[in-house]
Image (tube, rainbow, N blue to C red):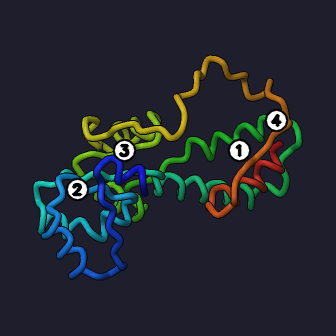
Amino acid sequence: MAALLALNVTPHELKVNRSNQICALLDNTKPDVVIFDRFFAEEAYSFHIKERVSNALRVLDMQDFHALRTKRQEVLQGALNAMPKISNSFSKDANEFLNDILYAKPNIVDDDMLKRELASIHRCDLVLVCSETESKLLSNKYGIDAHKLVVAPFFCEPLDQTRLLEFEERSVDFVTIGGFWHGPNVDGLPAKSRVL
């Protein structure tokens, strides 16, 4: 909170589903920039922004490309159900298993979450994405204008991919850290223990 106040940013807390409160806040503050922390928030509140402060810059912070994560979870679950046990060695099966998950992409024709997420992206002026890969995917596969996508990686500089060992050359020792409140972290642990 102190960091926000130091930047002359005044946070406001609003109760969910209180249209009169958000309208009053927007009327009183007339913000120049509105940041939505997920596409769900943009869906819920963007019409108020457009109605009350139509000139405000609308920014979507895509902490997570939800449709992509959901698709990868579906592929993971399907693969785990189809394969009772993955070999302990880094076999071709294990590599194919990981590649199927890594390269899974949601389909615009039958993925309602993707449609909603892309609609939210289109309604915003600027979109913060976690990686260059997500930016390229949104631009190249789903037709989002590249000028509105900004890569905002968390916590560290992009990894120098030239320093990575090939998958087969890596050690099988690993550590995983997390609170396991996030679905992909929970789902990933059994897969890691089977593959590694």
Which mark sits nearer the N-terminus, 4 or 3? 4
Note whether 28 is above or below 164 in the view shown: below
Secondary structure at badge 2 equals helix
Q: Residue at x 30, y 59 (%)?
A: 10
Q: Amino acid at mark 2?
A: Arg
Which disc number belongs to residue 91?
A: 4
Give the Cα separation between the discs numbered 2 and 3.
14 Å
Q: Which residue is mark 1?
A: 97
Q: Which residue is mark 2?
A: 123
Which mark sits nearer the N-terminus, 4 or 1? 4
Q: Residue at x 36, y 60 (%)?
A: 39
Q: Amino acid at mark 3?
A: Leu
Front-most of 5 and 191?
5
Q: Number of labelled discs? A: 4
Note whether 134 is above or below 178 in the view shown: above
Which mark sits nearer the N-terminus, 2 or 4? 4
Give the x, y percent position of residue 164: 68, 22
Which disc number belongs to residue 128?
A: 3
